[in-house]
Image (cartoon, grey):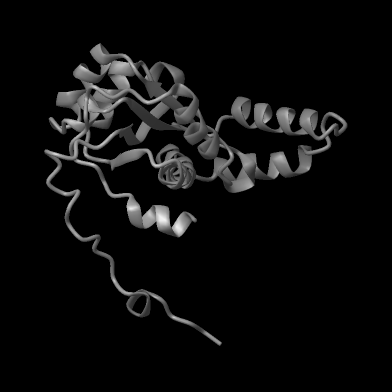
Amino acid sequence: MLLDNLKWRYATKRYNSNVKLADSEVFKVVEAARMAPTSSGLQPFEMILVKNQEVKEKMLPIAMNQTQVRDCSHVLIFAAWDSYTDKRLDAVFDNMEAIRSLEKGAMDDYKNSLKANFGKLSIHAQFEHAARQAYIAFGMAIAAAAELRIDSSPMEGFHNDQLDELLGLNKRGLKSVTILAMGERDTENDWLMPLEKVRFSTESILTIIE
């Protein structure tokens, strides 16, 4: 059950660097993220899956020397579009019309309304909107990893601009948003593993309006 698996998971602090996850299992996490809902179905983000140990070593100082990125099996990076261009929106709706066997241009009215609305926003605001969509997928990936009993570490503590440069994301019109390290916990050296999970009570964070 998902709730049981969410209670099992925690933000892993130490990984067993000798354990490598099966790609087939990691791709299930990727697929869960791909299937996440996004505003207007835009999916304004991409994922970068890092398995290469040399690249992970280079990521270590960028991630403020958090050893998870070096010692884990796979690092999944979520990178949002830097802006909503006409080309990108055209591609989204061309794909939608093709998959749904719609006449080309059937979605033009809605597409053009989105173009107009995004056009009113600053480039930074456009990126922030795209980043929020990436976070939806990020949450789905965390849940999927828990379901598969894959240890993971959600991470925001890194220098985004440096990671973008390392991975060449700027050249692709992308900006890194967040990282999910995945692997197997180091049961002997992870200080957080034996500690009780801490969350506020349901009553303290839930307001019911009847």
How many numbered dots are placed on residues in this image?
0
Q: Whole-percent x and y of residue 96?
A: 73, 33
Q: Nearer the viewer, residue 196 or 39?
A: 196
Res. 169 image quadrant: top left
> In this rendering, is residue 108 above or below 98?
below
Q: Whole-percent x and y of residue 47?
A: 45, 28
Q: Is residue 107 left or right of residue 146?
A: right
Q: Is residue 54 visible?
A: yes
Please tell me which residue is depicted at 22% across the width and 34% down the height of the picture.
158
Please tell me which residue is depicted at 88% across the width and 31% down the height of the picture.
103
Res. 88 image quadrant: top right
> In this rendering, is residue 205 above or below 29?
below
Q: Is residue 175 left or right of residue 188?
A: right
| Extreme residue toward the bottom, this view | 210
User: Quick one: quadrant of the C terminus?
Assistant: bottom right
| Extreme residue toward the front, this view | 188
Q: Whole-percent x and y of residue 208?
A: 48, 82
Q: Whole-percent x and y of residue 203?
A: 36, 80
Please tell me which residue is depicted at 58% across the width and 47% down the height of the picture.
39
Q: Nearer the viewer, residue 174 or 51?
A: 51
Q: Is residue 44 left or right of residue 19?
A: right
Q: Is residue 45 visible?
A: no
Q: Is residue 122 left or right of residue 194?
A: right
Please tell me which residue is depicted at 33% across the width and 27% down the height of the picture.
75
Q: Nearer the viewer, residue 142 or 124?
A: 142
Res. 113 image quadrant: top right
